[in-house]
Amino acid sequence: MCGCIHPGVLVCSLKRDIPQEIEPGGYHIVRFPFSDDESYDAHAMHQSIQPDAFVINDDGWDDDDRSGLIWPTRSGWGTLHALIQWGSPAATATEYRDQFVRDPLGLFAPPDTTATDHRAPSPGGQYWSKTHGIFVHPGVPLALRVAHNAPIPLALTLAEFKLAIHPAA
């Protein structure tokens, strides 16, 4: 017996199917709604009242980078998953980028990126999924970030961001 408050695997699964305009240039946090029927957050890792007492208004989640944060509720081995789908670009992008990041807003420490991928566009749609494992800790939020190099904003049309925390000995 581990003596854990929550034995077993804890899961937070977020989905966004409302397009998010991504400006060209640097990385941008993918933002997720708090009450989406497709999302799952039984362990309160993606809440509008965040662990550091910051509050995101229910109608303002799409404008606030904090709506893209998952706050792990215990330490352990975190398996991160992402699904990323871009809309048809009105301008040519020659590179799409994505990454997972610890403390992406630098709230407690400098951002720490991992699993950064740079991809050339495919002849069909720009649809990718990825999985990566890292140690996670309460108080260190996680996010999914994306970027592109088109000269105009592009629509991220579907995104999923998931964390499964496995107990680590």
Image (cartoon, rainbow, N blue to C red):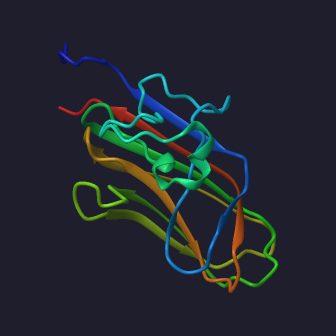
Q: Residue at x 35, y 21 (%)?
A: 8
Q: Residue at x 34, y 37 (%)?
A: 72
Query: The C terminus appears in which quarter of the rendering?
Result: top left
In this rendering, the answer to whether 8 lies above or below 165 is: above
**Relative image position of residue 161 (x, y in whole percent):** 54, 46
Q: Residue at x 65, y 33 (%)?
A: 36
In this rendering, the answer to whether 68 lies above or below 90 is: above
In this rendering, the answer to whether 39 lies above or below 118 is: above
Q: Is residue 147 left or right of residue 51?
A: right
Q: Residue at x 69, y 82 (%)?
A: 93
Quarter occupied by residue 121: bottom right
Q: Is residue 94 left or right of residue 63?
A: right
**Relative image position of residue 101 (x, y in whole percent):** 38, 59
Disc count in the image? 0
**Relative image position of residue 122 (x, y in whole percent):** 73, 74
Query: The N terminus appears in which quarter of the rendering?
Result: top left
Quarter occupied by residue 3: top left
Q: Is residue 47 left or right of residue 97?
A: left
Q: Is residue 151 left or right of residue 132?
A: right
